[in-house]
């Protein structure tokens, strides 16, 4: 089993705090330092036993002496933080992240941090912050490791061991393939959820009080952090623009079927989607954990 004497969590939100709790629960670390923009949030994390030391203004201080450094802030500032910590990290430390965006960012971070391994745990939800953190968040989830030719083999093995130890099924994927896949099955659904809720707002926002379980399920991820998803969508825009085009074509096809008044064709369209969606029920018994990847 892997063990890191000191772990630095740079960004103590839902994922960062949950990883800290899971590592403590599994005996994978001895000491955890935390960096974040809110001193109040870090003090709450310390009081709850998520971290041992707080560094609200200095990621380099949090990372100093750590055997594992975890980037868990919004992805838009990963590069900035990596540059801030590169002169303070231990020579043999491992650096990783929890971000939903990989692609060229992984290669950029590899140029800054000597033993960086890109990781994306497919876990979370619409709830944010340390109040929702749990040591069991990752159990039954997938974790994608975006291994590259430059990645340190021992660091990759250590990350695979870490994620397996906290309950994840580990898969390896090229960073650019990762961004294509998750643009389709994660980033696009978030855009659609935001658009769906704004459609109600553009019509009459007061009508949302009549929404039932179907609307709640379809729009749940619109409760996710706007800052976090702004960065992800902006940085993965090329893939998203391609898939929003495909999505528009599907809406246009349904619109045409509605206009034609042909019930059989409309039913076949819905049945095709139902059959594909049903595969999730068979392949992923922990679907409710994987809704905000």
Image (cartoon, rainbow, N blue to C red):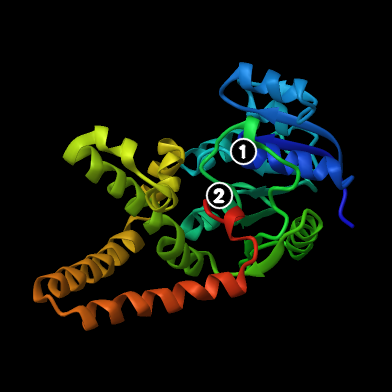
Q: Residue drawn at (46%, 41%), measured in percent from left and top?
A: 224
Q: Residue drawn at (75%, 39%), measured in percent from left and top?
A: 20
Q: Residue 99 carries which label?
A: 2
User: Is residue 194 in view?
Assistant: yes
Residue 53 in the image, given as x and y percentages of width and height: 77, 23
- 10 Å neighbourhood of mark 1: few (<14), some, or many (≥20)? many
Question: Horizontally, is 246 left or right of 166 in the view?
Answer: left
- 10 Å neighbourhood of mark 2: few (<14), some, or many (≥20)? many
Q: Residue drawn at (30%, 82%), measured in percent from left and top?
A: 268
Q: Which of marks 2 and 1 is in front?
A: 1
Q: Is mark 1 on a helix, strand or loop?
A: helix
Residue placed most toward the observer, 267 or 10: 267
Q: Is mark 2 on a helix, strand or loop?
A: loop
User: Is residue 12 in view?
Assistant: no
Which residue is tagged 1? 14
Residue 23 in the image, given as x and y percentages of width and height: 81, 44
Residue placed most toward the observer, 142 or 7: 142
Residue 118 in the image, given as x and y percentages of width and height: 61, 56
Question: Horizontally, is 161 left or right of 196 in the view?
Answer: right
């Amino acid at each position: 089993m892997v063990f890191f004497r000191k772990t630095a969590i740079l960004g103590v939100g839902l994922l960062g705090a949950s990883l800290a709790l899971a590592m403590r629960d599994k005996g994978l670390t001895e000491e955890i330092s935390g960096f974040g923009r809110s001193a109040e949030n870090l003090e709450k994390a310390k009081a709850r036993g998520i971290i041992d030391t707080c560094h609200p203004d200095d990621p380099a201080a949090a990372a100093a002496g750590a055997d594992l450094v975890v980037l868990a802030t919004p992805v838009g500032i990963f590069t900035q933080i990596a540059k801030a910590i590169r002169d303070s990290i231990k020579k043999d430390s491992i650096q990783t992240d929890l971000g939903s965006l990989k692609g060229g960012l992984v290669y950029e971070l590899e140029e800054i941090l000597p033993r960086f391994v890109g990781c994306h745990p497919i876990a979370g939800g619409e709830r944010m912050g340390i109040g929702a953190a749990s040591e069991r968040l990752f159990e039954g989830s997938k974790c994608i490791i975006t291994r590259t030719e430059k990645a340190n083999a021992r660091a990759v093995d250590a990350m695979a061991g870490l994620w397996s130890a906290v309950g994840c099924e580990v898969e390896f994927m090229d960073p650019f393939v990762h961004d294509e896949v998750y643009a389709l099955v994660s980033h696009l659904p978030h855009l659609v959820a935001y658009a769906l809720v704004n459609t109600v707002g553009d019509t009459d926002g007061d009508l949302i009080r009549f929404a039932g379980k179907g609307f709640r399920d379809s729009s749940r991820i619109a409760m996710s952090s706007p800052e976090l998803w702004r960065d992800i969508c902006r940085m993965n825009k090329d893939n998203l623009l391609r898939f929003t085009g495909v999505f528009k074509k599907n809406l246009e096809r349904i619109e045409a079927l509605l206009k034609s008044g042909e019930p059989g064709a409309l039913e076949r369209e819905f049945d095709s989607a139902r059959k594909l969606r049903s595969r999730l029920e068979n392949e992923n018994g922990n679907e409710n954990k994987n809704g905000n990847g």
